[in-house]
Image (tube, helix red, strand yellow):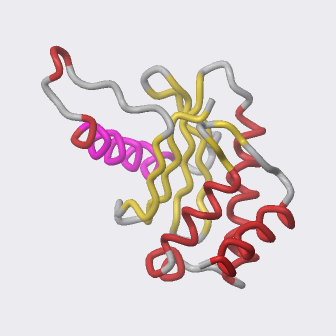
Amino acid sequence: MIRFFLLQNRQGKTRLSKWYVPPPTGANGTTTGEVEKVRIEAEVHRLVTARDKKYTNFIEYNNYKLIYRRYAGLFFTIAVDLADNELSYLETVHLFVELLDSYFANVCELDIVFNFNKVYAILDEYMLAGEIQETSKKEILDRVKMLEKME
């Protein structure tokens, strides 16, 4: 199951953050969920960007695995359960990038920043409640276009 999906640039700015499972709070509830999310996002960015390219794109972090991929200046990171298949989630990241690329015709970071609602719509059509809902690129893009017409 997917715990969270992050899209961050090289400087550490989170451009997309989708949490399917709330983060664990500190002992005795000392930290709130939002504070914990920011802390985890910063730590994930530090781990992913500092990692040498000769290593795999999988990192064990707390009670889950981080699967990440870098495209241009953006890092796409998925946190999943320890027992899940890493390669299938690496393909999940790649398909999401292909979806963005098809929708925005050669996507860049500015497309994500200025059209974040469309990016979330694409992600929601692709993943639901921490599970992959649809794997057909054509079907997902058709649904997103249908939603656009309804607006």
Spot occupied by residue 3 in the image (x, y as percentages of width and height): 52, 34
At horizontal 54% and vertical 62% (from top left) the residue drawn is: 120
At horizontal 69% and vertical 59% (from top left) the residue drawn is: 96
Spot occupied by residue 15 in the image (x, y as percentages of width and height): 43, 64
Is 18 positioned to the left or the right of 33 in the image? right
Q: Decide whether residue 38 is among the magenta residues.
A: yes
3 over 46 or under it: above or below = above
Spot occupied by residue 112 in the image (x, y as percentages of width and height): 51, 74
The image quarter containing residue 1 is top right
At horizontal 62% and vertical 54% (from top left) the residue drawn is: 124
At horizontal 72% and vertical 42% (from top left) the residue drawn is: 132
Spot occupied by residue 28 in the image (x, y as percentages of width and height): 15, 15
The image quarter containing residue 37 is top left
Residue nearer the viewer, 87 or 114: 114
14 over 28 or under it: above or below = below
The span picked out in magenta is 36-51
Is 85 positioned to the left or the right of 79 in the image? right
What secondary structure characterizes most of the magenta part? Answer: helix
> The C terminus lies in which quarter of the figure?
bottom right
